[in-house]
Each structure stands twice: as C-alpha cells, then as structure tokens.
Image (cartoon, rainbow, N blue to C red):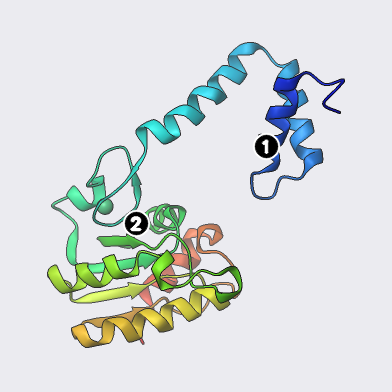
Amino acid sequence: MATVTPEPVTRLIEAFSQLPGIGPKTASRLTFYLLRRPPEQAEALATALHELKQKVVFCRSCFNITESSPCGVCRDEGRDRTTICVVEEPLDVLAIERTGEYHGLYHVLHGALSPVEGIGPDELRINELAARVKAEPVREVLLATNPNLEGEATAMYLARILQPFGVRITRLARGLPVGGDLEYADAITLSRALQGRQEM
Ligand SMILES: [Zn+2]
C-alpha cells in the first residue's frame, strides 16, 4: 500500500490503528473521511491532540486530569476533606460528579489490578493513596472501582492496605450492573449505589 498511498495517509492510518478498539479498517475509514473534509476539521483535531498533552496534567494530589494542579476539586474549600472516593479512571469522577450526590475528594488509580495484563500495585497510584490517608484528615475511603473482576480484586486489595490506618472503608452498593464500567452507569443507579454504600 505504501507505494501507491501518499506517506502522510499511511502514517495517519498507522497512528489511528494504534488506538484501542480501532482496527486497520476503521483507521483507513477515519483517515479518508478526514481527507474529504475541509482542512479546518483536521486542523481542529490536530490542535486538540496537541493541547491534550500540552495543557492537561495530572493533579498532584488526586491524580485526576486537570489544566492546573492541584485540580479544582482538591482546591475547592467547600468539599468534604474527610472522605476520599477511589476510582479507576478520570471518567469515573465525571460520572460520580454528575450524580450531585458526592461532596468529598477523589483519588484516581489509573487502572485496576490485573495480573493477566501485568498490572500490579506499583502500576497504579496506590502508594500515593496510602500516603494521603496517612497525612490527610481522612475518615472514610469509598472504594468505587468498577463492579467487575478486576475492580473487585482492586477494592479487596485496597481494603487490606488501608485497614491499618483505622479509617472507615466502604464500597459502592450492589445494583450497579456487574461486569460493567462505572462511567456508563446512569446517574440514578449510581446515586443509589453511593447512598447505599456499605462497610467492607
Ligand atoms: Zn485533585
């Protein structure tokens, strides 16, 4: 293909192919779609991609994504600083914020334990969480990892790690679709799961 296809086209197809869930076919379709569109559309995409790495950083406290560290939630004096809600991904923070039901702080692990994928405790922000629980006036840690195998295993592990600190450790109530992702749960289901959280 490289011989008949201009190099920039091949390069973009390859770049798209490396994204999760995008095979070579979709990568080609996206590339040729952009070729047919006005230049502004491709430029807007390029700018968005560029600024993603230029302007977005991780909060030094909760590791959520933010434009300035510490993030808005960590800076907000109105938040309940005695509760930390632990989630796998930044999108989970959005899902929980959408419920309007939670007013504490967050901690983003950036994944879940998965021996199959070679993700152990050191690949996640677990040490940083333990350090926060130790140093900050935390009374409750709400484990809001996904209701699937990896999420449950991660919650169990965290409960064990955090136990010596003498804080209340809770888990989202059942009722969330098992095997699902927190970020896709509807706001009502997630609200109920927050309200009905249980001791671990
Ligand atoms: Zn933060």
Residue 144, by quadrant, is bottom left
| Residue topped by disc 1 | 16
Residue 18, by quadrant, is top right
Which label number is shown at residue 4? none
Q: Amino acid at mark 1?
A: Phe
Alpha carbon distance from label 1 to label 2: 36 Å
Instruction: Answer whether labels 1 and 2 touch (C-beta < 8 Å).
Output: no
Crowding near the residue tagged with mark 2, few <14, some 14–19, many ≥20 C-alpha atoms within 10 Å: few
Can the viewer see residue 103?
no
Of labels 1 and 2, earlier in sequence is 1
Q: For the point 26% across and 39% down, which residue is it?
A: 68
How far across and how far down the image is residue 71, in percent?
26, 46
Distance from mark 1 CB to nearest ligand 1 atom below 8 Å: no
Mark nearest the camera among 1 and 2 is 1
Q: Amino acid at mark 2?
A: Gly
Nearer to us in this view, 26 or 171 = 26
How far across and how far down the image is residue 42, in percent?
61, 20
Left or right, 154 with respect to 104, comes to right
How far across and how far down the image is residue 101, in percent?
33, 62
Residue 22 in the image: above or below residue 140: above
| Residue topped by disc 2 | 100
Nearer to us in this view, 98 or 2 = 2
